[in-house]
Image (cartoon, coloured by chain):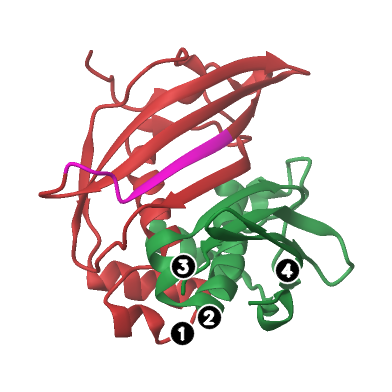
Chain colours: A red, B green
């Protein structure tokens, strides 16, 4: 199933699978991420590994290139599990799906499950679940 | 490993930092970067990305556990309240338990008023 440009998350049914997205966890990106979160630890450079949340945030950012979130959308929960280190410079492929969708108290709550798999590997290095709540009045047609 | 050896991490948030995070990750939701828009919302002003605040917890764990966190860490959190430019956030460990092959910590982030912004659990392999 092809994804139209900028699909609205709240319009996607449970079970919907996003097209795979690949990106490089570049040294430049990791540097800009660490600068933004003001994490000066040397451990990442010493080990050649990216912070797990840098990889997760990059993956979610890639999803936002094809996924429209209304301006009133709220990120209400996050899970991340690291299965293997994420080397700086690695090319990762994100596979994601809408794992849950529910409506309650005027909110549409969607859970996106995703995994990041390094090129050349069959096993995900990081898995995650992101919970987003969108006010139902903003769900169709985007935010203000 | 005891909880006393982990954290805390304290950060002062600024709008410039929020904008750097938006630029780095590609999340330019106006609730984070457009003050005029944000003032029209129930939040009343810009707020930091939840993942930016959460990074303080990950930093705390990386500082304490190094490669074990980078290769086998887990977290599960809820975002409970907004962090705003000018806020001073503190990430800390509340409790510790051994669970199977891992150490499990109850963690949280609070602002300078003591309001909980994030809470949940993190797990790290116990190691040798």
Magenta stretch: helix, strand or loop mostly: strand
Q: Chain of mark 1?
A: A
State the residue position of label 4. Answer: B93
**Viewer-nearest of discs 1 and 3:** 3
The residue lying at 15 percent from left, 47 percent from top is A121
**Does residue B38 sit above or below A135 in this rendering?**
below
State the residue position of label 2. Answer: B63
Work out how far the residue at label 1 is from the one at label 3, CA to CA, in angstroms: 13 Å
**Image quadrant containing the C terminus of chain A:** top right
Q: Chain of mark 2?
A: B
Query: CB atoms at circles 1 and 2 under 8 Å apart?
Result: yes
Work out how far the residue at label 4 is from the one at label 2, CA to CA, in angstroms: 13 Å
Q: Helix or strand or loop: what does disc 4 sit on?
A: strand
State the residue position of label 1. Answer: A41
The quadrant where residue B61 appears = bottom right
The residue lying at 86 percent from left, 60 percent from top is B115
Crowd band around label 4 with a 10 angstrom C-alpha radius: few (<14), some (14–19), many (20+):
many
Q: Chain of mark 3?
A: B
Q: Which residues are magenta?
A: A122-131
Q: How far across and how far down the image is residue A46, in percent? A: 31, 85
Mark 1 on the same chain as mark 2: no
**Image quadrant containing the N terminus of chain A:** top left
Residue B27 in view: no
State the residue position of label 3. Answer: B69
Question: Residue A87 lies in magenta, yes or no?
Answer: no
Work out how far the residue at label 3 is from the one at label 2, CA to CA, in angstroms: 9 Å
Residue A46 falls left or right of residue A131: left
Farthest residue to the right: give it.
B113
């Amino acid at each position: 199933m092809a994804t139209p440009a900028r699909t609205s998350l709240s319009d996607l049914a449970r079970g919907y699978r996003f097209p795979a997205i690949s990106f490089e966890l570049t040294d430049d990106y990791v540097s800009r991420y660490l600068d933004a979160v003001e994490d000066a630890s040397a451990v990442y450079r010493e080990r050649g590994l990216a912070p797990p949340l840098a990889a997760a945030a990059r993956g979610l950012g890639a999803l936002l290139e094809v996924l429209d979130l209304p301006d009133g959308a709220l990120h209400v929960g996050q899970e991340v599990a690291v299965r293997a280190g994420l080397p700086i410079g690695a090319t990762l492929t994100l596979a994601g799906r809408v794992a849950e969708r529910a409506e309650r108290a005027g909110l549409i709550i969607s859970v996106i499950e995703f995994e990041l798999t390094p090129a050349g590997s069959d096993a995900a290095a990081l898995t995650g679940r992101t919970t987003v709540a969108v006010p139902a009045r903003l769900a169709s047609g985007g935010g203000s | 490993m005891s909880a006393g050896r982990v954290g805390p991490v304290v950060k002062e948030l600024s709008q410039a930092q929020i904008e750097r995070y938006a630029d780095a990750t590609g999340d330019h939701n106006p609730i984070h970067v457009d003050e005029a828009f944000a003032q029209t919302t129930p939040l009343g002003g810009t707020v930091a990305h939840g993942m930016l605040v959460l990074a303080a917890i990950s930093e705390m764990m990386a500082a304490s556990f190094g490669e074990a966190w980078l290769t086998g860490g887990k977290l599960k959190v809820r975002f409970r309240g907004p962090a705003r430019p000018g806020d001073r956030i503190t990430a800390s460990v509340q409790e510790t338990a051994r669970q199977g092959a891992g150490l499990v910590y109850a963690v949280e982030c609070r602002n300078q008023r003591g309001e909980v912004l994030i809470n949940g659990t993190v797990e790290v392999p116990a190691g040798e």
